[in-house]
Amino acid sequence: MAGKTDTLRIRVQKLNFWLIVVTLATTLGYAGFCLWQVYTGKPAGQNIESVLPLNPRLMIGLCWAAATLTLLFLPGVGRIVSAFFFVAVLYAFGSWWSATSLIKANLEDGRIVGANFVGNLLIGAHPFDLVIAGLTLFVLVLDVVVIYKKFILRANRQQEAGLPSVVAHK
């Protein structure tokens, strides 16, 4: 049983390492992407992007940064807190899609003029935003797997260290 627990512990450590690496790389990449979008121009279909509350890039970036920091500095509870941040990011993408759908419903032809497929899906979006949405879902699943495996590992350790249910006395 000890060998199985050690193997599980090593697998959890590897998953945890990759969770932190992917989260940190995505946070830095998305921050760079958002800065690039601010300084190189506006996407088609949204001329006043910084004024409209429909583009949740700032909240998405802040949630990714907060999830990264909790994973790095709160090893025990950080995974659970980061899972809530990833759910918030998915909610932000959902509300972005919903707002775009409402805008398109008020237009005559149901399309945003001058926008490509991604811009008609999420107003003012870039294909990289869809990559971030997919990565968010992937990292959320990875985070939940790490939480579950840590729970199993803790249960195995308690079972190995526990006394039998009936202790015989002389």
Image (cartoon, rainbow, N blue to C red):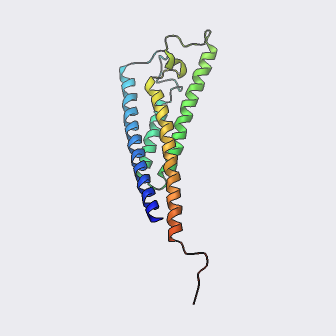
122 versus 65 height, above or below: above
Tell me which corner region of the image, top left, top right, bottom left or bottom right, holds residue 65: top left
- List x then y, in percent, for residue 69: 42, 46
38 versus 21 height, above or below: above
Residue 58 or 123: which is nearer the viewer? 123
- List x then y, in percent, for residue 40: 36, 20
Q: Residue at x 52, y 47 (%)?
A: 144
65 versus 37 height, above or below: below
Q: Residue at x 44, y 53 (%)?
A: 12
- List x then y, in percent, for residue 85: 51, 42
- List x then y, in percent, for residue 66: 45, 43
82 versus 32 height, above or below: below
Tell me which corner region of the image, top left, top right, bottom left or bottom right, holds residue 37: top left
Figure label count: 0
Tell me which corner region of the image, top left, top right, bottom left or bottom right, holds residue 8: bottom left
Residue 143 or 35: which is nearer the viewer? 143
Q: Residue furthest top?
A: 108
